[in-house]
Amino acid sequence: MELQRVCELNTTGSKKTKRLNGNGFPPSLVKMENKGSDEVEKLKTKFLSVWHNVKYSWALKPKTSFSRNSPVLLLGKCYHFKAEDDESPSEPSDEEVVLGDVDAFRKDFASRVWLTYREEFPPLPGSTLTSDCGWGCMLRAGQMMLAQGLMLHFLGRDWTWPEALTLQPLDTETWTTAAAKRLVASLEASLQGAPGPSALSSTSQPQGPSFGSAEEAEAHLKEMYHRTLVSWFGDCPSAPLGLHRLVRLGLTMGKQAGDWYGPAVVAHILKKAVEEAMGSGLAGVTAYVSQDCTVYSADVVDCHRVPRAGQTSDETPDATPLPQNDQPAHASTFPESRAVIILVPVRLGGEKTNPEYFDFAKSILSLEYCIGIIGGKPKQACYFVGFQDDSLIYMDPHYCQSFVDVSTNDFPLQSYHCPSPKKMPFSKMDPSCTIGFYSKNSKDYERIRQELSRLLQPSGKEKYPAFTFAQGHGRDYDLSAGLNPEKREWPFIRDPRRTVTTVGDFVLL
């Protein structure tokens, strides 16, 4: 056929023929076709991102409503939205509502680290996936809980981000407008070959003014800790607590990128990640996961002790911790102690959460050393940080954002903070969850143990506590006799001679 040859006129005016490659098209056309395919894939990825956001309701739900007559609890902090001098039964104006703690609550909530779905990051270990949309929500929820523990350690519970109130709310109108602008800008950049918004946002910003007072120096130091902490959760292989590291650790537990991760498995992945990251400025922190819904006090106290020279490599930091004089006063570490993030996987019922545990969950979220609860709805994880009346307040990871290169100086922090809290009835909470606590040292742990033991005392209605404390080490109870060390890491392993009905990783009491 004539299409199988291309005639070219040479310098002498004669004709010569050039045979095409195997698909019948010249190389230039093939290159154009490949480039077009790449552009189509990029467009598909961007539209898929928008679809995930619509699917998980960020673009559809209106603003979250809060009652002005009931207190709001947020990780141990209590806020009242009603003005103290307002005794009028009529509905107040907006100006009167602001007289309460609305802004204080907004600033506190927006200061928590928000980790969501991301796209266009380097491929995850053992796969070609460059996004965790649709499957990574429990890992993201676990990251947020771990980040809160590290914030307590390095910054303290009273710290808030100075720019928290400048964030735009993610309600229906603002989200759709921002999403449309971002999508159009990305499409135009793809067609023109220019860098997209995500690349432009990673450029360095000019340095701020120098500080002169001690208060300004302290604020500057805390902001450095804030930025460093966020960078630990970056979506790149080098981030010590990033998604790539968690997925790599999950491979050792039989989980792959794209799999569903439960709250108990995530607790063990986080523990291993913290242990491995001890040389990345985290030598003063470690993690402990309870066994069979039991926290063994001797094991926690051992975790508080700094490992000595001569111990195994996985117990000894491979680098020195951050200098003592570079830490905020309340985040300083003791020579003989390190902080412990205690993770307790539990099941609060059978198929559904037992209503008898609602008050227990409220009591837990009212404690300042509680770093939250990871759980959510079936197959849709959330990070619970507080409550009002009979509704949980949570941070939602189901919001797909672009990759941010945290290795650059002054990378943008806005996408790591959420201005819009969400609420969910306690009745919709999945019974499988993991509760987190922060213990500064052994003395602090003893106070936590005593206080939680009182909360865990069964009431007249409740027959069984959500979890328990026990003296001694877990190994003293021979719960995993004959098992190798790797299998001993898994939760809820019982003596095979005991007959207990179980569901998944959890024991039904």
Image (cartoon, rainbow, N blue to C red):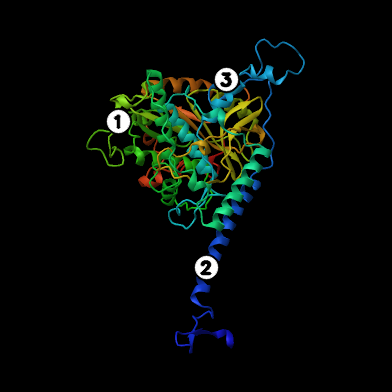
Give the Cα distance between marks 1 and 3. Answer: 35 Å
Give the Cα distance between marks 2 and 1. Answer: 56 Å
Return the residue nearer the eye: 2 or 322: 2
Report which residue position mark 2 lands on. 34
Q: Quadrant of the N terminus?
A: bottom right
For disc 3, the neighbor class at 10 Å (few under 14, some 14 to 19, many from 20) is: some
Residue at (43% x, 37% y) in the render: 410
Nearer-N-terminus badge (2/1): 2
Q: Is residue 490 above or below residue 427?
A: below
Return the residue nearer the eye: 279 or 14: 14
Q: Secondary structure at mark 3?
A: strand
**2 vs 1, front mark:** 2
Nearer-N-terminus badge (1/3): 3
Nearer-N-terminus badge (2/3): 2
Q: Secondary structure at mark 2?
A: helix
Image coords of residue 274 (percent x, y): 39, 38
Q: Secondary structure at mark 1?
A: loop
Give the Cα distance between marks 2 and 3. Answer: 58 Å
Res 306 label: 1
Q: From the viewer's perspective, is 485 left or right of 64?
A: left
Image coords of residue 85 (percent x, y): 67, 10
Image coords of residue 205 (percent x, y): 44, 37
Report which residue position mark 3 lands on. 78
